Amino acid sequence: MSCYFTRLKVGHPKPLVAPLDWPKCWKIYTICAERNRASCLTRKDVAEILSKSQLDGAAARKSFHDLLYKANTGLPLSELYDEKKCHEAHSFKYKNNEYKIFRIWGTGTIRIYFIYLEDRKIILLKTKPKRTDSITKGEKEELQRLAEKVIDCISSTAFSELEI
Amino acid sequence: MSNTEMVVLDGEEDFDMFGELPPSDPFEIKKIELAANLAALLSFKGISRSKLAEILNWKKSRVTTVLSGNSNATLKTIWDVCLAAGYDFDVVFKLAHERCLDQPWQKYEREQLLWSRASVMDCQTLHKPVMSFVVQTQREVEHDIRHGNAKSHYFSVMQNDQGDTLKPKASFLSLNDRPKSKFFQHSHTIDIESVDCVKVDR
């Protein structure tokens, strides 16, 4: 089993950028289904959002910009967002450990779900518009499946960066 | 056991998830960046949004708006927030995506707001007169020095070469004539155990 990650970068026109890294910043990654960046799950989420609403698509872009700048500070994300905008969405036990999935309520109705990993890494799990605050059992299961895949990958190998 | 590989993809190939949208307005992104920095400054200083509203006599909704990245914050608004956090700001010109200066949270460890709960210790020994000590962070000491409020002496707690703190030694040091100097002259050295201290919180 292999899992691939790519750094979240947003911007238009090109070049796509993220704020410059420094040692204590949070680094945001998205999961790629295959060994190419075009297969990243966040890109699929965004494509689905844009297929239904350009307004939600613009809101997602703005939400990512906001998250990138806040993550770059290296400070606790929950303190950089309004108290209702960033909190735990779901917790679960897996392989004798407890894990938490967090949710950011971005611009408009956009919700961004993610987990924290060691060495100041944030892995995006799902991005979607949502009209209600609570998440369904099905949504929790979907998020948990993605998180477990990431955890399995992390637990069995070191997180290393390669240039493709 | 399956061969697991974790790969982070990076390189020249860039893809734009939002290519079908009109280009981002750079000013809209700058507003987001500014708001994120203001939020970070408040977080670094341990000032909650409620506390900021109280300090500035704002409604909480106004704080939310200013820190949302959606508003076109005026210079006065930025100034008010900075002042509430005990900071000033400069306008520094740079090339796009170039980092110029580090922000406070990149230069210093996050403070525990000793300023707001500075503890003053009144100490005396059998042979020395009563002395008053104020506990300060490195930042607070530097701030005092820069603003002409340096104390006459500073009491530094040191560790031995092995990093032991069981019996720390302390040295009285005097500021020399160069208050901006990183190097202070340490004079008389005593054991902390030889000083009886009574801690008074203010």
Image (tube, coloured by chain):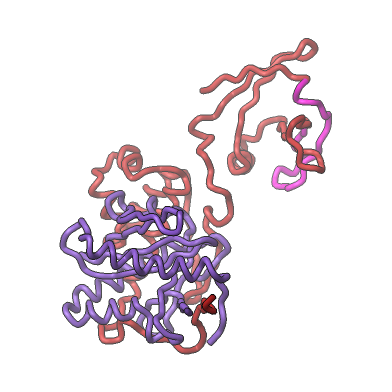
Chain colours: A purple, B red
Q: Is residue A107 magenta?
A: no
Instruction: Name above or below for residue A117 compared with residue A87.
Output: below
Let me know if residue B175 is in the magenta part.
yes
Instruction: Say which residue appears at 19% left-offset and 75% top-offset.
Output: A55
Q: Nearer the viewer, residue B76 or B188?
A: B188
Instruction: Write the residue at 52% across / 61% down.
Output: A118
Residue B135: percent from the left, percent from the top? 61, 31
User: Relative to residue A123, is residue A111 drawn left or right?
Assistant: left
- Seen from the viewer's position, the closer of residues A114 and B136 is A114
Instruction: Say if residue A86 shows up in the picture.
Output: no
Q: Is residue A70 left or right of residue B100?
A: left
Q: Position of residue B12 (x, y in %)?
A: 50, 88
Q: Taking A43 as reference, is A102 above or below it?
A: above
Magenta residues, start to end: B172-193
* Residue A35 relative to residue A144: left or right: right
Q: Quadrant of the N terminus of chain B?
A: bottom right
Q: Residue at x 27, y 64 (%)?
A: A111
* Residue B125 seen: yes
Query: What is the residue that sits farthest to the bottom in this orientation?
Result: B13
Image quadrant in which you'd find residue B121: top right
Residue B73 found in image quarter: bottom left
* Image x and y of residue A32, in percent: 41, 80
Q: Name the spot of residue B63 as percent of width and height, x first.
A: 29, 49
| Number of marks in the rendered image | 0
Q: Depth check: B26 or A98 in front?
A: A98
